[in-house]
Image (cartoon, rainbow, N blue to C red):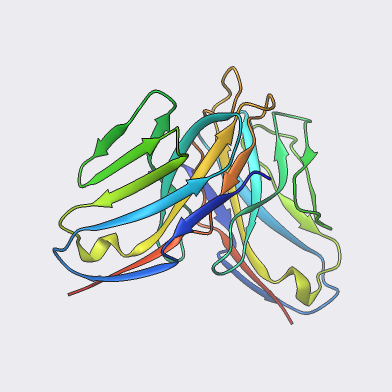
């Protein structure tokens, strides 16, 4: 069982609202990631972090921002939500290795966001 | 273009039957391939990892195969159970960067009926 938690599980908000999706892991993993997943589609990487004070944009352009002030915490923020942001957001972490993508990802249960 | 294609898109089988899911990839250079199981409303969970030198690997009733020459992998599920109902996602990693970029398939949605 992975020790990575996301809150809230479900969120329905109106257009223009600012939201923060929370993600915490207790495994001490250096690397953390945010993915976006729509039904029947592949996961798209929107942000990742190598460790504290490290954040990078992923492959999919996103209007969200992230921060990594503590190893265990990797929140994602949308300053002004729009209906196009409606999606499932998955947080993941992995142990730091020598590199090369060999790490196994541990995923949270996701946040299903609906913007009206 | 690096891609991961999975088939079938969806599959319905009866409890107790076997099934095989396919994954074809064009990712190069190849590092490894993982199969993940994603239950409805949950995040994906890793089932197995295949590296270049491995042909077959089992995890309980799940058996993964890899043919690095043809760039194909399969996931065989034996004696299916209702709890096997989930989306199975194939993920391929390349060696092209320090991060080791991951390429995700769209998944096969498996439904097991009693």
Instruction: Indicate whether A116 appears above or below A38.
Output: below
Q: Toward which corner of the image does residue A81 lie, by quadrant? A: bottom right
**Residue B48 is drawn in which quadrant?**
top left
Q: How many labels does the image show?
A: 0
Q: In the rendering, at what x and y percent does residue A21 appear?
A: 68, 57
In percent of width and height, residue B58 lies at 25, 37
Q: Which of B55 and A45 is in front in this view?
A: B55
The image shows residue A95 at horizontal and vertical percentages of 54, 27
Q: Residue at x 45, y 33 (%)?
A: B69
Residue positioned 17% across, 75% down in the render: B114
What's the residue at 77%, 31% (across, down)? Answer: A54
Residue nearest the observer in this picture, B112 or A83: B112
Left or right: A67 as drawn, with respect to B36: right
Q: Quadrant of the C terminus of chain A?
A: bottom right
* Residue sitting at the far top: A98
Q: Nearer the viewer, residue A36 or B27?
A: B27
From the viewer's perspective, is residue A103 above or below residue B73? Answer: above
One can see residue A2 in this view: no
| Residue A41 percent across, percent down from the top left | 58, 63
Note whether residue B64 is visible: yes
């Amino acid at each position: 069982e992975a020790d990575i938690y996301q809150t809230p599980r479900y969120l329905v908000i109106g257009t223009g609202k600012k939201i923060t999706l929370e993600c915490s892991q207790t495994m001490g993993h250096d690397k953390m990631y945010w993915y976006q997943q729509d039904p029947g589609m592949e996961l798209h990487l929107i942000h990742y972090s190598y460790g504290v004070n490290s954040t990078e944009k992923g492959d999919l352009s996103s209007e969200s921002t992230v921060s990594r002030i503590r190893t265990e915490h990797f929140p994602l923020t949308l300053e002004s939500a729009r209906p196009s942001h409606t999606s499932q957001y998955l947080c993941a972490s992995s142990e730091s290795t020598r590199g090369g993508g060999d790490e196994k990802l541990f995923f949270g249960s996701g946040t299903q966001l609906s913007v009206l | 273009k690096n891609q991961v294609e999975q088939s079938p898109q969806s599959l319905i089988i009866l409890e107790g039957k076997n099934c095989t899911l396919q994954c074809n990839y064009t990712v190069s250079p190849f590092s490894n391939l993982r199969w993940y199981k994603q239950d409805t409303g949950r995040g994906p969970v890793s089932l197995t990892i295949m590296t270049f030198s491995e042909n077959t690997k089992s995890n309980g009733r799940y058996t993964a195969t890899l043919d690095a020459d043809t760039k194909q992998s399969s996931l065989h599920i034996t004696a299916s159970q209702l709890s096997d109902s989930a989306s199975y996602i194939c993920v391929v990693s390349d060696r092209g960067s320090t991060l080791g970029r991951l390429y995700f398939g769209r998944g096969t949605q498996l439904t097991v009926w009693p």
